[in-house]
Each structure stands twice: as C-alpha cells, then as structure tokens.
Amino acid sequence: MKVTLRQRTKNGKVSLYLDYYDKGKRKLEYLRLYLIDKPRTPEERSFNKKTLQLGESIRSKRQLELQNGIYGFQDTEKINSLFLTYFELLAEKRRDSDGNYGNWLSALKHMKNWEKSNVRFADIDREWLEDLKYYFVHEAKTKQGRALSNNSCVSYFNKVKAALKEAAKDGIILRNPAEDVDGIKEAETKREFLTLEELKSAATAYCEIEVLKNAFIFSALTGLRFSDIEKLTWGEIQYSKENGNYIRFKQKKTKGQETLPIAEDALKYMGERKEGNEKVFKDLTYSDYNNAKIREWMIRAKVEKHITFHCARHTYATLQLTLGTDIYTVSKLLGHKSLKTTEVYAKIIDEKKIEAANRIKL
C-alpha cells in the first residue's frame, strides 16, 4: 500500500497531489500546494524545495495512516457506525439552543432525503463530502419545492463539518476528512435596516403583539440580539451613578460577558421593573407567525422593506455609524469579536453616501 507524491502542470501552475489505493479504490488527493514552474532565481528554487518538503511530510503521514488502518488504529465498531445516527445525537445535545437546534434538525432532515446519506464513518471521504455539497446546493428542496437558500446550504454543510470535527475529538475517526474540503461560499446578503425616520414611524404605529414591538424597538436602541433579549432578566438590568442604566449579561451566541449601556429612550420599552429572575420581555418568542406580524406592523408604519426581527440590530449598527459613532465603539457595543464583522455595516453606509451623492444631477 504505497502513497506517491506526484505533480501535475495545468495553466502554468504545478500542483502537488497524492496518488494511492484505499480499499481497492484509487484516490487522488490534491494538497493545494503549488510549485513555481521552471524556477529561475535562488529564491524560487528555495520556495520549491520547501514546498516539496511539506508535500513529502504529508505523504509520509498519509502512508502511516493507511498502514495503521482506516485513519489509524481504531475501534472497528465506532468506525463502522452510521454517521447520521451520531449527527442526530449531536443535534439533540443542542435542544436548548434557540436557532442552532433547528438548523441541526433541518440539516439532518435534508440529509435523510439524500440517497448517499446512509453512510458509515469509514466511508466518508473528500468525494462523499463534495457530493453532499452538490446535493445541498443543487438538489435539496424546501417543503414548498424550492431550492435551498445560500445561507441554508452554508449552515447545513458547516454542521456536517462540525460533526466530523467532534467525531475526531471523540476518537471515532483519527483524521477529519472535512479538513480537506472547502465550505460552501457565502453569498453577500443584503442587510436590511430602518432609517431614523422609519424607526420613529414604527415606534408610533400599531403592532398586534405589544411585547414583540417593545422588544424590536429595544433591540434597535441597544443592538441586542433576539436570543439575548428573549432571555434577558431584570436581575441583569443594573444602575450606577457613574454609568447610569446598563445591562450586565453573557452573550448567548459568543458566550462572552458584556456590559451594555441602556439608552434613556430604550427604558420605556422595558415596562415596570419586576423580580430579578423574571424576564423583561415575558412571552417573547421567535416564529414565522411573529415575523408575519412584524411585516404587518411595518406596513402600518409605511415601511416598504422586508423587515425581520434581526433587522433591528442592523438598524442600531447603521444608525450609530450614520450619526458619527466611530466603528471601534460600535464594534464594542455590538459585542463583535472582530472588527471585520462591523465593517460590513460601514460598507453599507458608504454605499448610501454614494447613492445620496448621485441624486444631485445638473
């Protein structure tokens, strides 16, 4: 059982790949390592030498893995167990996680509809994962018979990659085949938000579900996510002479501990203070029904945009930047770990400025 490091030249690039047989099946594993074709300088020759050394290191590792069995010495019962059974167990572990549990279940449902889903861990390789990507993007359908959205495809495939990563941690596989496979590329989505005038209009318009309206406006004035607003208790609302009213809470998404000042205008949407363990926005839920009620509310407010609850957080970010708050402060207020996440909103503001400038015509 020999693993050979080979080279293939295409479009002026020399690609390194491994050529070997596994369980009687020929495998070509491209390493995404490239040599400079016909190196001329000492630097180029040195680069090629180091790249070849790296390729040889990977070849030796793969040779050892194959000699030891399927990705190492393993419990044959585990490696021959069904991936979907394990995936379902991981989904159940996330039952108490709001949107995340639903995403795992949806990914599971779509995989069960795929003809190649009844697979053992031992049979999962790069080819199977690439086929699964193709299925999500081109073949999987919603209940209404429509193709999956890009966001859904990205989310579902990421869940599969996460499951395989966890399987490696659990010792079911000693090497994660998903490491060799790119995720599905995210399409740039439009982040809808309300202007200040639209937010004021929404604040005065009637909404059938009062707690939904209060929570939405509160999110637009504080930048809090739905998941953090839904679980917000009165015990997390604090006050000091130096800082005024503020929230001391743990972000559900990032698990980070945050301190967030509460704007004066936001206080009135919280209602009367209650016991510390009581929720501020009692009976607030996320559902398609509530999103429909938000759309009805926006129609009454004369807002001609597709607005969901998450748009309230987008509104907060864009209004802060529009009104002159620097991007570093906005990033901290939103609880972003990376400034790159916040820069998406800055790009929106720049686009709006260009749009406004182009309105003046001679």
Image: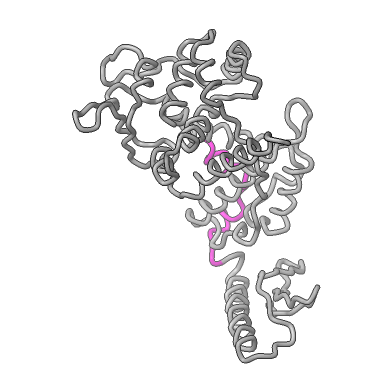
Secondary structure, magenta segment, majority class? helix
Give me the residue at 44% from left, 31% from top: 223
Residue 86 within the magenta-colored segment of the rendering = yes
- Foreground of the two, 298 or 259: 298
Seen from this angle, which residue lies furthest left?
241
Q: Residue at x 35, y 13 (%)?
A: 271
Q: Is residue 180 above or below residue 57?
A: above
Q: Position of residue 54 (x, y in %)?
A: 58, 79
Going by the image, does 320 lie left or right of 279? Answer: right
Residue 309 versus residue 174 in the image, above or below: above
Q: On the picture, is 141 further left or further right than 90?
A: right
Region rendered in magenta: 72-92
- In the picture, the quarter occupied by the C terminus is top right
Q: Quadrant of residue 87?
A: top right
- Number of callouts in the render? 0
**Residue 148 sits in which quadrant?**
top right
Give the position of the N terminus as an image quadrant: bottom right
> 102 or 295: which is nearer to us?
295
